[in-house]
């Protein structure tokens, strides 16, 4: 008789408990609840950080547990953002355009409405036609499906191609990076219908919630992000425990041996790759309405490398490690680049953190990789293990 | 003796007297009536008479005449070139060029030739300019003809050809003469001959001439009129849209103008009465069909012009013939021009292909240069160096800094190349010793560590050099381009990069295959343990190999900086492409990198050929192609064989 899942994974309970406490704490301190100790913009940052944690644990599963260093998961994250952004932009533009059209003496025809919306959205790239990609943008349901299905399908096709020809290790990383570059170049083009360089903007205005304050809406998104992270954490904890988890870890450690034992290595890898891509899409769909804007730069290969770096700093092969890494690096990043970190005056030269933060970050990657191969989570483990050492 | 001398003197005096007689002023005086009140019928006589005068004086006089700067003194009828100066005039003597100022212009009259006369003067002037002794003026005249050809330039141009001393100018004159003949000669046979001779000329001008001859316009009629040089009969719906066809009908006055959506809407709005239009309540008018129905009701009452439905339009277009006709009425000439253009298109296609091949070759050599260092560090050592792009950047900035201190671009380039190598070699060695050595057994983590170095270096460069692009100026002898004809051409920098790539290919092959270092590198790559037991120090070899790869990246940086701009992000633009080049080519093999670079460079230009305006799309499709390519040859074009392959 197997013990229940949560009993076997006490860390999941601890994590959920911690997340719940954090969420309640932030809610009580937020502006919407009255105390106002947590400003709306900081609340947004926290909500975004939760989404980044979600994509980071997805990355941890695919890399830390399954050994696939994917340099494309942030692209899936971005695609999720674009998918929801298309609906947000369409619905919001419709909300702006319709009253004007209805104020005219004649009621608008469907064609006129479409033209007016298209003109608003695509005017910046010198077009007013709705591209085929936007065919479903009027429907929230379909775009929500796209949030999951488009990254999933892309990962499925790409993974199937890559895994079946046994591209592994470093080569796979380069190939996923190439895929990411191709995607970002595609999004950068004006004529692919995603507004090129401009990306999608105004996503923080949720159609139908115009009468609600941003403080309130941000809080809802914060809750949704926390819920998604909790569900994602449980899902991935379930995936990496038990038999399935053992197989994917074995693939990480010695792929050939697992294959010789009769497992279909490709199927396992493909499942993990696709599942994590879908979760990344969901995380992106929650992130970008809080960020308010998405552009192709977010999809560029460098973003996916950063994602890998968060996981490496937090500690691979442990889900809470990814959460630690993503939280720490992204919050520190926004603290340093936001200009709130105090400058250091050396007399001859003033170190401005907005200029020097990336140098510090880069060097700390090197130090962490060299001296903390298991990341910060590894330190944590060491403390825990000391207590119940055999 | 004295007599002979006197005779000579007499002859000289007589000669000078004769010369004096043919001064420009005297000729003008002999024609004074025709000069001061010129008309189309008299002006030719004046110009014929001017042939006697010294040509260098005639041109300015004709210019003045044309531009209404020729004045006549009322008292004695002497002509001057004059510029109004306040209330007075600055007079220039027609023969000597001597200037005098007069305060009062009342004793002088301006000569005002009419437009027709001015045109005659103009073409006569062209002839004088075309035979001007000053080659610059002749070229200027030719240039103005080339820019703005007109029929009356043909005769002066032809007349100036036999006396042209300079072969270059002569060739240009003949070329222009052919073009003008093809367009304007009254004799069709001469035009056809000229058109046929243009078939061998790939220049933009020649193509423009042929295209002008073949200029067409769209027309519509019930029947094609007699004598029209028809290029094509058009079928509405296939060759042109029904809307365009109908618009032609409207323009030709053969059909009523259609009611535009806007006009329909405003007509409906104007006729709103009691919340409905023509009996239809306003809220029902939210479809095109309902709006048209309401409008038709209005039209039936005669309040608005009738609605032209799609069916009406199709019927109207069916009843007429649409065709494009040549502006040139002679079908023989258009046929000849078409044949010439078709022949030209084939040659043009070949030339464009050759030009594209040059571009592809140059792109391939850039990719090769950027990737060859990686081929060594990644291909031979298996180390993923994400900071490779930053080594390229460091090389480029080294070149820039050298230029700040050494103003001579040639010398600074000669200093920059080895210096860039030295700097990046040092950086590579340091990086190998401090970081990469400790991650030997964790290749994926070298990726992260070197990525950290990459962002740190990028930001460092930004802090030092700022975010704006820095110029790395090439020496003068590398400026400009090698131009074969109007289509095929390539800049010297790209040729230099190509040569540099070739040199590096040779150099690296030599180092790896023919030197002691190369032997040791290959030994360490294949089996470090065995190499160490043979007395090779693997640590030292790894360090040197990494330094070599990084140093070459530095030199590539100088080369790339010469034609692209030097920014802190220039390296990251090449890093993914470089990795793909190495992977596609096959790891561990310099020839493989060459093959990979060629495939990617040529492939990318090949895709651009189909859609030249969109480089981004070409890159996107190229990457997709590479991803698919890896499916079929996971080990690259030139795969490693045997134990070193690792499987």
Image (spheres, coloured by chain):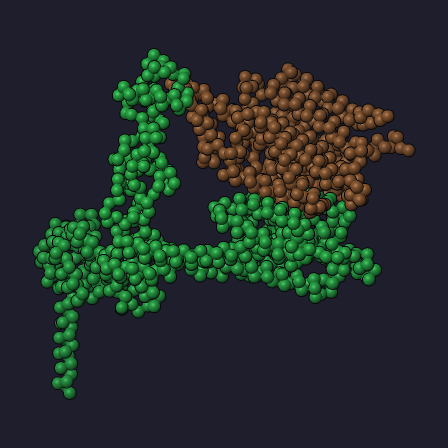
Q: Would residue A1 be found to the left or right of residue B92 on screen?
A: right
- Residue A154: x %, y % from top left: 63, 37
Q: Going 68% across and 28% down the picture, which residue do you hit?
A: A50
Q: Is residue B150 above or below residue B172?
A: above
Residue B567 appears in view: no
- Residue A261: x %, y % from top left: 81, 42
Q: Would residue B3 be found to the left or right of residue B263 on screen?
A: left
Q: Going 80% across and 59% down the picture, which residue do you hit?
A: B531
Q: Is residue B206 above or below residue B16?
A: above
Q: Going 66% across and 21% down the picture, which residue do you hit?
A: A223
Question: Which chain is depicted brown?
Answer: A
Residue B596 appears in view: yes
Question: Which chain is depicted green?
Answer: B
- Residue B151: x %, y % from top left: 25, 55
Task: Give the image quarter of residue A4.
Answer: top right
- Residue B256: x %, y % from top left: 27, 31
A259 or A114, nearer to the observer: A259
Q: Would residue A109 be found to the left or right of residue B90 on screen?
A: right
B547 or A128, nearer to the observer: A128
């Amino acid at each position: 008789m197997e013990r229940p899942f949560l009993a076997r994974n006490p860390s999941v309970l601890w994590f959920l408990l911690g997340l719940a406490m954090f969420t309640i704490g932030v809610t009580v301190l937020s502006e919407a609840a009255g105390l106002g100790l947590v400003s709306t913009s900081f609340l947004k940052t926290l909500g975004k950080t939760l989404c980044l944690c979600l994509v980071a644990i997805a990355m941890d599963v695919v890399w830390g547990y399954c050994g696939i260093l994917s340099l494309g998961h942030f692209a899936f994250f971005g695609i999720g953002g674009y998918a929801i952004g298309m609906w947000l932009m369409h619905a919001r533009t419709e909300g702006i355009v319709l009253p004007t059209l209805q104020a005219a003496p004649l009621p608008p025809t469907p064609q006129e409405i479409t033209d007016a919306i298209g003109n608003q959205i695509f005017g910046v790239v010198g077009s007013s036609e709705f591209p085929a990609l936007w065919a479903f943008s009027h429907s929230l349901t379909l775009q929500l499906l796209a949030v999951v299905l488009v990254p999933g399908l892309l990962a499925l096709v790409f993974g199937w191609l890559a895994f079946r020809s046994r591209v592994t290790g470093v080569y796979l990383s380069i190939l996923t990076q190439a895929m990411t570059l191709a995607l970002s170049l595609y999004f950068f083009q004006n004529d692919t219908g995603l507004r090129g360089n401009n990306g999608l903007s105004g996503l923080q205005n949720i159609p139908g919630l115009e009468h609600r304050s941003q403080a309130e809406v941000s809080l809802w998104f914060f809750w949704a992000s926390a819920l998604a992270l909790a569900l994602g954490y449980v899902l991935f904890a379930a995936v990496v425990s038990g038999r399935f988890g053992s197989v994917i870890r074995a693939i990480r450690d010695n792929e050939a041996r697992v294959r010789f034992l009769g497992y279909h290595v490709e199927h396992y890898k493909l499942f993990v790759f696709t599942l994590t891509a879908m979760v990344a899409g969901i995380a992106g769909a929650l992130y970008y309405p809080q960020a308010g804007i998405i552009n192709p730069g977010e999809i560029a290969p460098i973003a996916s490398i950063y994602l890998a770096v968060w996981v490496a700093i937090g500690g691979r092969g442990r889900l809470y490690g990814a959460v630690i890494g993503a939280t720490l690096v992204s919050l520190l990043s926004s603290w340093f680049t936001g200009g709130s970190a105090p400058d250091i005056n050396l007399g001859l030269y003033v170190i401005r953190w907005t200029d020097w933060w990336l140098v510090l970050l880069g060097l700390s990657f090197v130090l962490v990789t060299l001296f903390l191969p298991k990341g910060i989570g590894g330190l944590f483990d060491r403390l825990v293990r000391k207590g119940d050492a055999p | 003796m004295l007599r002979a001398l006197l005779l000579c003197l007499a002859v000289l005096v007589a000669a000078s007297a004769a010369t004096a007689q043919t001064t420009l002023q005297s000729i003008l005086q002999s024609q004074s009536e025709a000069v001061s009140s010129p008309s189309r019928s008299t002006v030719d006589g004046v110009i014929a008479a001017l042939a006697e005068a010294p040509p260098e004086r005639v041109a300015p006089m004709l210019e003045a005449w044309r531009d209404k700067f020729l004045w006549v003194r009322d008292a004695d009828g002497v002509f001057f070139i004059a510029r109004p100066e306040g209330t007075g005039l600055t007079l220039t003597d027609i023969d000597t060029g001597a200037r005098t100022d007069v305060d009062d212009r009342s004793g002088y009259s301006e000569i005002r030739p009419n437009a027709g006369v001015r045109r005659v003067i103009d073409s006569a002037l062209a002839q004088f300019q075309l035979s001007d002794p000053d080659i610059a003026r002749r070229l200027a005249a030719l240039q103005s003809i080339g820019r703005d050809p007109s029929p009356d330039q043909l005769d002066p141009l032809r007349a100036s050809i036999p006396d042209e001393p300079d072969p270059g100018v002569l060739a240009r004159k003949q070329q222009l003469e052919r073009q003008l003949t093809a367009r304007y000669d009254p004799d069709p046979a001469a035009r056809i001959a000229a058109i046929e001779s243009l078939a061998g000329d790939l220049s933009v001008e020649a193509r423009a001439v042929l295209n002008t001859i073949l200029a067409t316009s769209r027309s519509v009629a019930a029947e094609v009129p007699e004598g029209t040089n028809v290029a094509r009969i058009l079928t509405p719906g296939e060759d042109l849209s029904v809307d365009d066809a109908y618009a032609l009908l409207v323009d030709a006055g053969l059909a009523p103008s259609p009611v535009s959506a806007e006009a329909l809407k405003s007509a409906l709005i104007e006729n709103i009465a009691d919340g409905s239009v023509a009996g239809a309540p306003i809220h029902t008018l939210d479809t095109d069909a309902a709006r048209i129905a309401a409008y038709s009701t209005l039209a039936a009452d005669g309040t608005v012009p009738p609605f032209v439905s799609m069916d009406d339009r199709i019927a109207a277009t069916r009843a007429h013939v649409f065709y494009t006709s040549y502006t040139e009425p002679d079908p023989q000439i258009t046929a000849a021009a078409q044949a010439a253009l078709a022949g030209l298109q084939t040659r043009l296609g070949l030339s464009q292909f050759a030009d594209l091949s040059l571009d592809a070759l140059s792109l391939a050599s850039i990719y090769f240069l950027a990737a060859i260092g990686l081929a060594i560090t990644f291909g031979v050592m298996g180390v993923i160096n994400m900071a490779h792009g930053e080594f390229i950047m460091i090389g480029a900035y080294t070149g820039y800094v050298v230029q700040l201190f050494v103003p001579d671009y040639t010398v600074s380039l000669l200093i920059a190349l080895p210096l860039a190598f030295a700097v990046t070699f040092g950086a590579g060695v340091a990086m190998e010793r401090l970081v990469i050595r400790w991650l030997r057994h964790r290749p994926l983590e070298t990726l992260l560590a070197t990525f950290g170095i990459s962002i740190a270096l990028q930001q460092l460069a930004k802090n030092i050099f700022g975010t704006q692009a820095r110029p790395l100026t090439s020496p003068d002898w590398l400026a400009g381009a090698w131009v074969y004809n109007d289509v095929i051409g390539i800049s010297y920098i790209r040729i230099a990069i190509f040569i540099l790539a070739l040199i590096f290919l040779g150099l690296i092959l030599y180092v790896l295959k023919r030197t002691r270092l190369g032997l040791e590198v290959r030994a360490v790559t294949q089996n470090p343990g065995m190499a160490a037991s043979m007395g090779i120090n693997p640590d030292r070899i790894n360090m040197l190999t990494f330094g070599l790869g990084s140093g070459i990246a530095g030199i590539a940086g100088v080369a790339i900086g010469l034609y692209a701009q030097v920014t802190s992000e220039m390296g990251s633009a090449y890093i993914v492409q470089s990795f793909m080049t190495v992977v596609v080519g096959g790891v561990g093999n310099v020839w493989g990198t060459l093959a990979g670079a060629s495939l990617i460079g040529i492939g990318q230009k090949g895709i651009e050929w189909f859609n030249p305006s969109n480089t981004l799309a070409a890159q996107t499709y190229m990457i997709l192609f590479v991803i698919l390519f890896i499916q079929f040859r996971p080990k690259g074009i030139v795969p490693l064989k045997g134990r070193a392959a690792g499987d």
